[in-house]
Amino acid sequence: PLSKADVTRVEDPESLIGKVDYFIIDKFHAGTKLKSVVNRREFLESIIKANKENFFSSVQIGDVVEGKVKSFTSFGAFVDLGGFDGLLHINDMSWGHVTKPKDFVKKGETIQLRLINIDPATQKINLSLKHMHEDPWTTFSSRYNVGDVVKAPITKITTFGVFIEIEPGIEGLAHISELSWTKRITNPKDVLNIGDVVEAKILGFDLDKKRVSLGLKQLQDNPWDSIDDRYPVGKVLTAKVVKLTNSGAFINLEEGIDGFLHIDDISWTKKIKTMNQFCNEGDMIDVMISRIEPENRRIRLSVKNLEGNPWNTLKKDYPKFSVISGEVSNVTDFGVFVKVIGGIEGLISKFNLIGPDEEYNDSVLEKFKVGAPITSMVVECNPQTQKLSLSIKEMIKRSQESEMAKYMASNKDDDDTFNLGDLLKSKEESDN
């Protein structure tokens, strides 16, 4: 019967025709029937049992055994050792990266393997193909040094980097941050493929953890090393807006290198609330290099520096206690804003809107209308803090002091005694 023809299921009975072997007689009929039943399976099982007992009693971990590849699974291959199987796990096929067991062994192939584990109680046998060769990590430090350049294929790509097979059994990781000096790589698959042969520099290694750090960008010129030469402070260029943020805009200067234009660096005087009030992504704008930080890979840009600083001009032309004209730009509870030369706004606090001898009341603010011309005196002009303080009170006070000085000068040859009444009388007479 087929069930007794072999230790495994017989798929093709005709394959047994002509095979010479030993059989155990199960039944023998003499006489007229002349019919007997023989059992090959039982004979083979006895041979396998003997072989297995001999194997477990004679071999030791580390011995080299021979077997035939029987079948494959997702986790490795089973090897026939004489009617009983040993497992060649996928991780024990090579010191290197293994994705397909069939790439290393073939079905029906007779191979030599090293015994790495044996358990008589569970009858489990673990075999290794990679242990037929020396672990390449044991000699890594004698063959490679930090700074060496290797040329090898990419075997695996992840979101955080690529694995490169330096040699069978040794893979290094090139982190995503080590792929390029300038390109913004969000996924290594966008720039590299499995199988690509690349050159990489060894940045470091840990033999205990069997890790090697690699870098691709180290074999390229770092554009930040010469950034000062290409973009000196003060250089003016036209560049493209590539991204807007709440605080400014990124401007592309060259491939992989952007400068940042802060919202406060657009205008000396105009208050920009949102960047799209000034520009949009894709716009070409004129900017000036205002600061370079190669060590931090930052470039600050400015639009307002394209023109002279009106604050410096104002401070020079209108020093402290100068009289300046402008127009009312806003009236608030705490004072009046005045727009003067250069578009600069100054503030006259509400207590400085009146003369030195007057008392402030809320009706004072009602006298000032937006757009109306106004004259006041500069009491503080600070270009660094962009603060301009103005005063009508100080202007009147100093005007009175000037009048008094003139009066004193005109009467110095007359009677030496005079009072404020004399001054006011003189002023009334001159007005008339």
Image: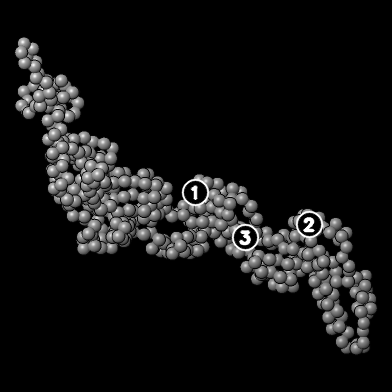
Q: Position of residue 382 (x, y in %)?
A: 66, 69
Quick one: label 2 or label 3, which is nearer the N terminus? 3
- For image coordinates 80% across by 71% down, the residue present is 394
* Amino acid found under the numbered disc labelled 3: Trp
Circle 3 SS class:
loop
The one of 344 and 131 positioned closer to us in this rendering: 131
- Horizontal and vertical percent position of residue 81: 15, 40
Task: State the residue at coordinates (45%, 60%).
Answer: 297
Helix, strand, or loop for circle 2? strand
Query: Which quadrant holds the C terminus?
Result: bottom right
Question: In the orientation shown, which residue stands out farthest toward the top?
Answer: 32
Q: Which mark is residue 242?
A: 1
Which of labels 1 and 3 is toward the front?
Answer: 1
Q: Residue at x 93, y 72 (%)?
A: 428
Residue 98 image-quadrant placement = top left
In the rendered image, residue 215, in percent from the top left (x then y), is placed at 33, 56
Position in image of residue 148 (x %, y %): 25, 61
Which residue is at the front of the view, 415 or 173? 173
Q: Residue at x 54, y 59 (%)?
A: 302
- Could you tell which of marks 2 and 1 lies nearer the N-terminus? 1
The relative height of residue 141 versus residue 191 in the rendered view (above or below) is below
Label pair 2/3, CB-CB below 8 angstroms? no
Between the residue at mark 1 and the residue at mark 3, the CA separation in whole angstroms equals: 24 Å
Residue type, mark 1 in image: Val
Crowding near pointer 2: few (<14 within 10 Å), some, many (20+)?
Answer: some
Residue 268 as seen in the image, left or right of residue 143: right
Screen quadrant of the N terminus: top left
Q: From the image, tell me which residue sits under label 3.
A: 268
Marks 2 and 3 sit apart, C-alpha to C-alpha, by 22 Å
- Residue 353 seen anywhere in this rendered image of the structure: yes
Between residue 48 and residue 147, name the one nearer to us.
Answer: 48
User: Looking at the rendered structure, which numbered label has been put on residue 331?
Assistant: 2
